[in-house]
């Protein structure tokens, strides 16, 4: 009884440990750099927080500037900001065409460009400022990420997607052939088992001819 009562307790502890480890994990992934004309484009910007239990005030600023081959860099334009827990549009060429696409915990601070045009090609800058609250001490942390965006008329073929599709068809053909071989093997094995069972039954039912000619003497 003692052993049986310990099993549910150990299972519950194990489940609590697994749930604790399965908390959402922040993963910093790069943004896509190719947009299609007339469609929406997500500019991915992720700034992971190493200490989630610490409260932080987050401000996000997005900037845009043209990419030039010359050494001179044109001035960047402030196009979007997130401040005081609310996203806000900034007057300029992107007014009304940007939408907030970040997460609630503000580790993902991405935005979306609506109805992409050729003029949207350029360099985008994501600037994240965090101010942590440690009582009277408020340290700050700043991170900046650049995204070089190019706009194309049609989407380019993704080599990874094509390779995955080819591998999927190859796998389907292999599985179909393997299933056919298994079916033939099982059918032959069942047929052989039926023949052996039929031969065994015939041997049990058959009466030897010697017993028919010389019947055994009755026992008195």
Image (cartoon, rainbow, N blue to C red):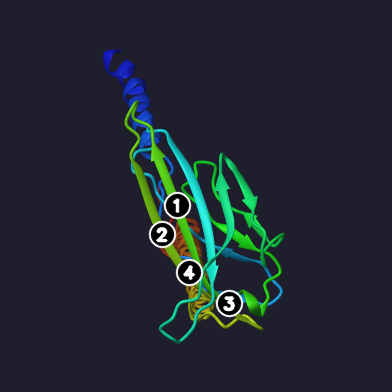
Label 3 residue SS: loop
Distance in Å between CA atoms under marks 1 and 4: 14 Å
In the rendered structure, are the residues bearing label 2 and label 1 in contact, judged by CB atoms less than 8 Å apart? yes
Give the vertical position of 134 relative to 145 (above or below).
above
Q: Where is residue 196 in the image (x, y as percent from the top left)?
A: 45, 64
Distance in Å between CA atoms under marks 3 and 1: 22 Å
Residue 32 appearing in the image = no
Q: Where is residue 60 in the image (x, y as percent from the top left)?
A: 51, 51
Q: Residue 128 carries which label?
A: 1
- For label 2, the residue is 144
Q: How many labels does the image show?
A: 4
Q: Nearer the viewer, mark 2 or mark 4?
A: 2
Please tell me how crowded label 3 is: few (under 14), some (14-19), or many (20+) other residues with Cα within 10 Å. many
Q: Nearer the viewer, residue 76 or 208?
A: 76
Give the vertical position of 201 relative to 161 (above or below).
above
Q: Which mark is residue 32?
A: none
Earlier in the chain: of badge 1 and badge 4, it is: 1
Label 1 residue SS: strand
Q: Which of 184 and 165 is in front in this view?
A: 165
Q: Which mark is residue 121?
A: 3
In the rendered structure, are the residues bearing label 2 and label 3 in contact, judged by CB atoms less than 8 Å apart? no
Earlier in the chain: of badge 3 and badge 4, it is: 3
The C terminus is located in which quarter? top left
Q: Position of residue 166 (x, y in %)?
A: 51, 80
- For label 4, the residue is 147
């Amino acid at each position: 009884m003692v052993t049986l009562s310990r099993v549910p307790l150990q299972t519950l502890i194990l489940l609590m440990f697994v749930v604790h480890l399965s908390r959402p994990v922040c993963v910093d992934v790069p943004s896509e750099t190719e947009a299609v004309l007339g469609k929406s484009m997500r500019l991915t910007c992720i700034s992971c927080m190493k200490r989630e239990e610490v409260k932080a005030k987050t401000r996000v600023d997005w900037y845009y500037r043209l990419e030039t081959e010359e050494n001179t860099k044109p001035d960047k334009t402030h196009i979007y900001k997130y401040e005081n827990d609310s996203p806000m549009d900034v007057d300029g060429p992107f007014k009304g065409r940007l939408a907030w696409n970040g997460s609630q915990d503000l580790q993902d601070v991405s935005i979306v460009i609506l109805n992409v045009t050729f003029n949207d090609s350029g360099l985008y800058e994501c600037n994240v400022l965090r101010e942590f609250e440690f009582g009277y001490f408020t340290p700050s942390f700043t991170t900046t990420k650049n995204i070089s965006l190019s706009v194309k008329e049609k989407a380019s073929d993704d080599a990874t997607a094509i390779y995955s599709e080819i591998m999927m068809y190859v796998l389907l053909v292999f599985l179909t052939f393997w299933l056919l071989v298994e079916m033939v093997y099982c059918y032959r094995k069942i047929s052989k088992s039926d023949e052996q069972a039929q031969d065994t039954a015939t041997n049990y039912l058959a009466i030897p001819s010697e017993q028919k000619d010389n019947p055994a003497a009755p026992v008195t």
